[in-house]
Image: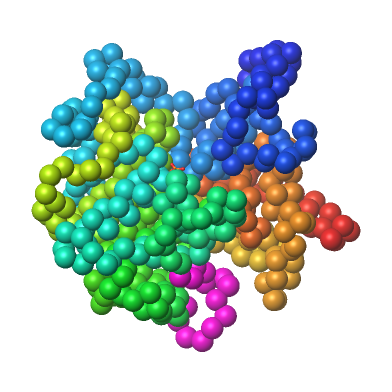
Amino acid sequence: MANKTFSAEEASRLYELDRTHWLHPQGDLDAPPGTIPQLMFASGRGAILTDIEGREYVDGMASLWNVNVGYGRAELAEAAAAQMKSLAFSSAYGGFSTKPAIELAAKLAELAPGELEVTYFASGGAEANDTAYKVARLYWKLRGEPGRVNIVSRIRDYHGLTYGATSATGLANFWKGFEPLAPGFLHGPSPDPYRYAGQGSAGEAYVRALEEVVLKAGADTVAAVVVEPVQGAGGVIVPPPDYFPLLRKVCDKYGLLLIADEVITGFGRTGRWFAMEHWNVQADLMVFAKGVTSGYLPLSGVMLTRAVHETLKTVKGPFQHGFTYSGHPTACAVGLRNLQILEDEHLVERAAEQGAYLLKRLQDLRSHEIVGDVRGLGLVAAVELVRDRTTKQLFDASAGAARRVWLAALEEGVIVRPLTGDVLAMSPPFVISNEQIDKIVSVLDAAITRVEKELKTTV
Ligand SMILES: Cc1ncc(COP(=O)(O)O)c(C=O)c1O
């Protein structure tokens, strides 16, 4: 264990200030004090986070699916410091520019699949999603079809929490209390093979159902379909293999733009540079964030195909969209250095290898009656808990099955993430070792054993 970095008095002073003055993202506002774990992290190295008491945790989530190269990378700190010393920030509006942003845009064009060649930069995934929806609507106006305004996403997609992205997100818990949502967002079904109970190919059935949503709205009212290649916050849903090729065909049939939200899956998370490469499917727009800097600084963006860019260039006057921090030079310098680390250390290949090991080890958890499914792609994986394996019936939400496992694992120094629908998600840094994966699995094994017993007696 590392040395304590804060005294007990200092820690309790800070926790009190935190409760009083900080409205946390996705904070549990109604949780009575002491019922949610308050943890203050002080340092990190590789896949390990250390809290202010000196306790170490294997971070099975890479924080928020994003610290892909792991914690404690001096190279990234040095890249940021060098850029800050010469020019921390300057405007990128109009013709103003900086070397790191230009070089990162060019590097992304080299790495991104096929025809995605041009980047618009933003800071977070939601901003980048909103940008993609605005670009899709503008594209159709410029092509003389101003009625194409609807954006179709899917139930269980998560695209972020600005208004546009909240409205595209297909998880109702993020809508509640914030209505009305933005107009022009429609939802098809989640392509969940575990829960599919129909006849024939699941991929075909899910695409047909999404096509029906398009037809019901009128194909000539739809601008784009936006999808997460692997649904993340909605439950780590890996679609059936024929799903994306068939979806691309439907988009082509009606002339819809396909937007791939690779915010989690981009930059190696699934064992390929970008997840759509698993199915050889070309998106017209691609949203990225998180892994581009491994979370060391906020940076996101949308990549466009040359064809979409050519259409945008027909706009009369300026492109009336932009954020102060679009193309932030320091964030872009860190992004470039981060991509170099991924390449130099072959971390995308490593994510594929460690992902295969994690998924293999997680299969052992199927020996528990309450484990319904174990799934993943590359280094993103999940365990779904069910009350009844035959019917796949879930526990009542009030039982908090996944939450209980999460808390029990946390006590043993392992961080996973409970998602709605009693899914435990994992998405560790690519540098995670086999021993650290073994620890995640053995801690989950014990935690599930404990919760299985609790639920038998209390639910
Ligand atoms: C697939 C996906 N899209 C978009 C977002 C939103 O990103 P941000 O929280 O940076 O706005 C997330 C965040 O988790 C995400 O997982």
Of residues 125 and 30, the one nearer the viewer is 30
Q: Quadrant of residue 258?
A: bottom left
Q: Is residue 30 above or below residue 243?
A: above
Where does the image place residue 186, in percent across and percent down from the top left? 43, 66
Q: Quadrant of residue 122?
A: top left
Where does the image place residue 142, in percent across and percent down from the top left? 16, 59
Residue 341 relative to residue 27: left or right: left
| Identity of the residue furthest to the bottom in this view | 199
- For the magenta stretch, what is the residue range? 188-202
Q: In the picture, which quadrant includes the N terminus?
A: top right
Q: Is residue 271 visible?
A: no
Where does the image place residue 356, in percent across and percent down from the top left? 48, 55
Residue 193 part of the magenta-drawn span: yes
Q: Quadrant of residue 374?
A: bottom right
Residue 122 part of the magenta-drawn span: no
Of residues 215 and 458, the one nearer the viewer is 215
Residue 374 relative to residue 165: left or right: right
Query: Which residue sits at x=69%, y=31%?
Result: 38
Q: Is residue 450 above or below residue 105?
A: below
Of residues 330 and 225, the one nearer the viewer is 225
Q: Is residue 293 above or below residue 5?
A: below
Q: Is residue 92 above or below residue 362?
A: above
Query: Which residue sits at x=23%, y=36%?
Result: 104
Residue 120 relative to residue 30: left or right: left
Where does the image place residue 459, in percent across and percent down from the top left? 84, 61
